[in-house]
Amino acid sequence: MKQIYSSIKLKLLIAAIATIYSTSVYAQGEVNSDSPSNGISLKSQSTYSTHYTVRVDDAVIGDSKAFTISAWVYVDGAGGQLNYSNYPILGLTNIKSLGNSTNIDVWLLNGTFSMQINNSIYGTEQSGELVEGTNNAAKGREWVLLAISVDDVDGKAAFYYDGVLTQTYEFEPGTIFRQDEETMFHLTNTSSKGSIATRFDDLKICNRTLTIEEIDDLKYAYQPDNIPDYLAGYYSFDENDGTVNEYANQGNGGEQYVAQVQQGQDPYSDYYMGFSGKLSSTNAAGEGIVNEWAPYKYMVTINATGPGSVTVMNGETEVTSGSLLPADTEITITATPDENCEVESITVNGNPFEGSAYTVTSATEINVAFTTKTAQIAADNGTNEGGSYILADPDSDEEFEKTDGYYNIAYGTEVEIVVASAEGFRTTAITIQPEDGQSSDLDLDNPVFTIAADSYTIQVDFIEMFTITYSAGEGGTISVTAANNNVTSGSTLDDGTEVTVTASPDDGYELESLTVNGNAVEVDAEGTYTFNIQADTEMTATFSKTSGVAQIGAGQAARYDIASQSIITDGNAQIAIYGIDGKMLLSGMGNTLSVAGLDGGIYIATINNGKTTEKIKFRK
C-alpha cells in the first residue's frame, strides 16, 4: 500500500505546476543568475553515524505499476576514487530501509554504477544484464545523469547512464511493488556502514516508462510552464544558503507530494524523524547542476476524418499524433485522400491551412477532413417532347436524390439512365459528355456508367414514329418494304424512313390507282412508288380487269398464258423477261417464251417484232 510519509518539521515551498503538452531538452553548465537551481548535498558520515536520505511517497505516480526515476548525481570520492562497495544511490526502497537494501536502485559497486533488483527486504540484490558495448564505470567528481525505467507489470527494467541504455533486467512481475509492502522513492548516499559525500539535483519521477528520446530529455531543467504530462514529481533543489529547508518542490501527480529528508543510524527502522538544519560541508556544498532551461516542446495532435490519411514529417522522421516537438520545428503536412475522394478542409489550430510547411510555435492541432468526390449533373428539364429520363441506382432502380434541379452523386457510383419515351416516340441514342472528356454513347439496352468526373452532360435523343397501314382492292396486291425489309400493315416506322410501295395486279387485272392518305400517286412501270414517311400513313391500291393482251401492231398481240407459264405472241418477236429491279432474266426469238423456270413474283415482258416494242406486266 502506498502512503504519504509522516509529517516532518521542515519549511517546504510547494509550487503547483499546471501540466501542458510540452517537455525539455539539454542541461549542464556553470551556475549563473538565470540558471535553474543548485543541488543539495548529503555529506559523508562514519560508520553508524547519522545518515540521510531524500524520500518521496510512491503515491506520486498514482496507481501506476510502471515508473522512471532520474537525478543528476555527483559523488565526491577522495582523490576522485570511487572504489566503494554496496552504496545505493536512487530508486525505490522499502519504507523501513534507510538504504541497506532496496527494491530496485542504481548502486555504486566497486567503481561501477549498476542496477540492482531485490525480491525481498532482506534479500540479496541481483544485477541487471550489461548491454553489449557499454561501460558503467563511475565518474568521480563529475556530474552524471542516472535513470532507471521499470515496468512491474511486464517484468522489465532498464538503466540509463548519461542517456545511454547500459543495463536491462527481466523479472517476475510483482517483484518491485510487492504485496502489502510500503515503498518510497529515494535519493541516498548511505549504506549500512557509512555514507559518501554526494550531491543531487533535479529529481524527476515519471508515472510510466519513457522512450529513449524522453530519457534524453531528462537531462534538462523544466520551467513552470513546460512540464510534460508524464512527469508526476519534479524536485529541483536549491542550496544557495546551505540549508535543506528552502528547496523547491514541484510535482504534478494530482496531489502534491513533498520531498522529505530523513535521518537515522539503524539501517532498518519503522520510523525516522525529519531533519531540519543545514546540509553542507567543505567538500559538498555550494555547487549545482542542470544550469540550462529546457527549450519548449509542444504536442502535435493529428486528426483525420473521412476517407483519407495524413502524414506529418519532421525532415525524414514521421510525426505521430501526440508527439512532442521543439519550438520552431518546421513540419510538412501531406493529406492523401482515398481513391475517388478529396480533401474537404485542413485547419491548424482552427485556422484554414494551405500549402504544406508549418512551423510549430505552440501546442498544434492539425485537423484534416476528407470527403468523397461528387459529380453534379443537371436533371432532365422536361423540354424534350420525345420523352424524359431520370438517374437511378441500377440495383434498386431508385432515383438518386435531386437538389435544386441537380443530382449530386459520389465518385465511383454506378448510375443508370432510365428513359421513358413519350407515346409515338422511341429512344435512338443516350450520350454522356464528362467534363473535360470525350463523349460516349451508352448501350440502349443497359445505359449504365460509373461516375468519374465532376460533372456530366447527358443527351437523350428521341425520334417520332408513324403508323403505316395499307390495303388492296380486288384484282391485285400491295406490298411495302423499308430498308429491304417487308413492312406489315399496322407497323410503325421512324420519322423520315424511306418506304417503297409496290402494287401488283393479278392476271387479267391492271392497277387503276394507288392513293396515299387519299391522294393518288404515280407509280413507275413496275408499279412502285417510293416516299419518306412523315405522318401516320394509309395507302390503298385499286385494280380493274383488263384483257391481258398487249397489241404489238398489225393485228399482232402478246399475253401471259398462266396454264403454260409462257409469253405467247401472234407472230415472231424478240421476247425478253425482266425482274422488277430491271435485270433481264430470260430472252428468246419466236412466238413463245416459257417462264416456268422463274420463281413466283412480278415480272416485265418486252416484245419487239422489229417494228414496235411493247411491255406487259405479269405475275407468275
Image: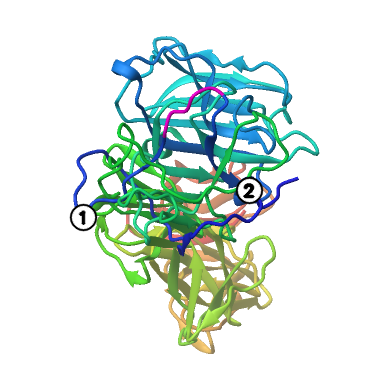
Name the foreground residue: 491 vs 616.
491
Residue closest to the eye, 594 or 343: 343
Mark 2 neighbour density, 10 Å: few (under 14) some (14–19) many (20 or more): some
Q: Is residue 558 above or below residue 455?
A: above
* Quarter placement of the N terminus: top right
Q: Amino acid at mark 2?
A: Gln
Instruction: Tell me if I can see residue 527 in this picture.
Output: no
Indicate the secondary structure of the residue bearing disc 2: loop
**What percent of the width, then of the height, locates residue 599?**
61, 45
Specify the quadrant of the image occupied by residue 394. bottom right
Asked whether residue 569 appears in the rendered view, the answer is yes
> Of helix, strand and loop, which mostly describes the magenta segment?
loop
Q: Is residue 128 above or below residue 29?
A: above
Instruction: Tell me which residue sits at (26%, 41%) in the image.
Output: 315
Q: Horizontally, is 29 left or right of 611 in the view?
A: left
Q: Nearer the viewer, residue 358 or 328?
A: 328
User: Relative to residue 283, is residue 543 depicted above or below?
Assistant: below
Where residue 351 appears, as percent x and y from the top left, is: 33, 71
Instruction: In the rendered structure, find residue 565 and report the number of the disc placed on it.
Output: 2
Relative to 497, 512 lies left or right: right
Give the number of the mark in front: 2 or 1.
Answer: 1
Magenta segment boundaries in residue numbering: 43-47
Q: Residue at x 55, y 33 (%)?
A: 91
Residue that badge 1 annotates: 34
Mark pair 2, 1: CA separation: 133 Å
Q: Position of residue 96 (x, y in %)?
A: 70, 36
Dot 1: few (<14), some (14–19), or many (≥20) neighbours within 10 Å? few
Q: Which secondary structure, mark 1?
A: loop
| Three-letter amino acid code at the position of disc 1 | Asp
Please state which of residues 402 and 123 is positioned toward the viewer in this rendering. Answer: 123
